[in-house]
Amino acid sequence: MLRISLECAHSGDPLFMEPYWRRNAAESAVLVAGWHRMSYQANGESFISLELERHLRLLHEAVGNAITRDRFIVFGVGSTQLVNAAVHALSPDDVNFNESSTALVVGTAPVYGLYKQQTKLFDSRENLWDGLTSNLKNFNASSGANFIEFVTSPNNPDGQLKQSVIGASSVIYDHAYYWPHYTAIPNPADEDIMLFTVSKVSGHAGSRFGWALVKDNKVYQKMVQYLFLNTMGVSRDTQLRILKLLKVILAQVGREGDIFKFSYETLNKRWTKLSNVISSSSRFSLQKISPQYCTYFHKIRDPSPAYAWVKCERMEETDCEAVLREAGIISRTGEAFEAESRYTRLSLIKTKDDFDQLLTKIEALVSNERVSS
Ligand code: PMP
């Protein structure tokens, strides 16, 4: 049974950006009169606001993290909705369906758990969760098998930039964290299907807004049809709010008050503090992320991942989530990412209070280690 918890260092709720929006409270506020935006329809096709679409393209251009030229844009109720919309769109058409063409959905561990959970939940005969790429012995791209590979880059949970492992013909790139807050941007992403979410750009996870950049017209049409039948698009109120937020972000790019600079500095400080504490531990270790040149900041930048991927190093401590829970820290077990329970994920993107408490508890754990050794 899936446990849904938004507590403590468990969830990826990006509240660390709240101070930025407090500073921009007036500029980012939205007031909607009762008679406004009542219709199902927006001014763009398939329920999308053309002005918002234009601003999303401007945002990618300003950040340099994705090519939007010659790409269609689909809006979703969070990128959560677009995950299955994309799987559906890449699966065989119902008309031509025969069982041997069922699309096999795969990912590489540690992998964001939603891909498997959704594919299993929708339990379609068009596609099924086929597990990890490491289990695909002797994979042969020309075998005719129909694979859909998820690549999360940077990866949730370990923050590494990733590429397709099996070279499947259909790859869904989830770029939720491909923003200067969390990673160096070495070049603009240029893949066939790329998913993004406002949750991790502005922090407005509760507005439930994501978008996909899609190269192929047929895939785009199938995603649009999915959105039509599923929710008839995204709330127009949400679209209006996101437009306002993007205008504030765009007005400050490269200037004093740049959200990317603020977010990078916040997360880099958190990562540095946590790594310093863990570096004196022999009981726990963290993932290694190398400094890398970032085209947004025009310099080599230090890591600022959204999550710490913690490993329990003691032979007998095979359940790292339980070890941390014992110390009052709620994390997400490695098993939720199809990895060993010797690993667990800590969220570094919650509020300052959450992080400060987390750090205090980790410091206590590590200093006890020194006392007892
Ligand atoms: N992809 C990844 C890798 C994520 O971490 C998340 C959120 N935790 C999502 C997609 C979904 O984001 P949302 O539905 O809030 O847009």
Image (spheres, rainbow, N blue to C red):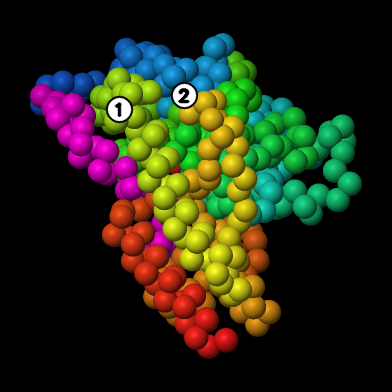
Mark 1 burial class by Cα count in 10 Å: few <14, some 14-19, many 20+: few
Among numbered discs 1 and 2, the one appearing first in the sequence: 2
Point out the stretch of residues depicted in magenta. Answer: 6-33
Q: Which numbered marker is on residue 172?
A: none
Q: What amino acid type should be assigned to the residue bearing mark 2?
A: Val
Q: What amino acid type should be assigned to the residue bearing mark 1?
A: Glu
Q: Residue at x 32, y 42 (%)?
A: 17
Q: Residue at x 75, y 34 (%)?
A: 168
Residue 191 falls in image quadrant: top right
User: SS for tag 1?
Assistant: loop
Residue 255, position as x, y percentages in the image: 33, 24
User: SS for tag 2?
Assistant: helix
Residue 144, position as x, y percentages in the image: 84, 33
Nearer the camera: disc 1 or disc 2 = 1
Numbered circles on residues, count = 2
Query: Does residue 168 show up magenta in the picture?
Result: no
Residue 74, position as x, y percentages in the image: 47, 24
Left or right of residue 87, residue 165 in this image: right
Q: Is residue 116 visible?
A: no
Q: Residue at x 16, y 21 (%)?
A: 36
Residue tagged 2: 63
Mark 2 burial class by Cα count in 10 Å: few <14, some 14-19, many 20+: some
Residue tagged 1: 256
- 171 or 144, which is in the foreground? 171
